[in-house]
Amino acid sequence: MKILLVEDHPELARSIASYLVQEHYICEVATTFDEAREKLALFRYDCLLLDIMLPDGNGINLLKLLRKEGVDSSVLIISAQNALDFKLTGLSEGADDYITKPFPLPELHARIKAIMRRRSPQKNNVLTFQDLTADLESMECRANGKLLSLTRKETNLLLYFINNKGRMLTRQAIAAHLWGDYTDNLDSVDFVYQHVKNLRKKITDAGGRDYISTVYGLGYKLNAPE
């Protein structure tokens, strides 16, 4: 799951982002209204964690704008404003939930999971493609029924391929998905090659088929055999 955290307090933003990454989310951070707008114009996020008081705008206004533009990402407001009026306004404008600062990070995580369950109540927690499976709860991945020993990046890479089966994924898109903001200032994303190579080897070593094909000069694609 890809999350955008809109929070201008540096320490809190680092704490939340670090915690969510440990829980296998991809978390990007925007510290201003304008930065959040720019990121939302470029990428799709499953969930927004949205502070109300931003240095250059108001989170509620950003929420209104997103809903007006048809952005369907889930929204969890995180705010120090505990007044009922703030909560009712946020929820009436299209937020899915509202949590008041300060809050325990496990509670934030539980609320995110609850929001996503409500959004997709029939969603299967296991992704499958041919003989590849990925359990979204345990984060265990298997090839031909055999458990794969994957790093966090390799696990997220496999999930990304399965969710985009049949689509050509550029190295730049893969890098941005796995590393988020950290790729903005990189001159090269050639390191993606090594991660894809390692994933392919682990799948075939486990007795699975290599469904990842290289689109030379462009990227990679997960395809069923013809």
Image (tube, rainbow, N blue to C red):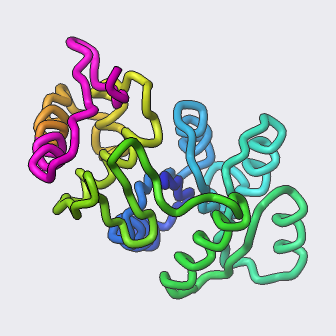
Residue 221: horizontal and vertical position, in percent?
A: 33, 26
Residue numbers of the magenta segment: 198-226
Residue closest to the eye, 181 or 152? 152
Which quarter of the figure is the C terminus placed in? Answer: top left
Residue 70: horizontal and vertical position, in percent?
A: 78, 37
Residue closest to the eye, 109 or 142? 142
Residue 184 to residue 91: above or below? above
Query: Residue 215: within the magenta?
Result: yes
Query: Residue 9: within the magenta?
Result: no
Q: Is residue 148 left or right of residue 68?
A: left
Residue 89: horizontal and vertical position, in percent?
A: 88, 66
| Residue at image coords 73%, 77% | 81
Residue lying at the far top of the rendered structure:
217
Q: Is residue 99 left or right of residue 22?
A: right
* Residue 19 found in image quarter: bottom left
| Residue at image coords 60%, 62% | 49
* Residue 197 found in image quarter: top left
| Residue at image coords 29%, 37% | 175
| Residue at image coords 82%, 64% | 90
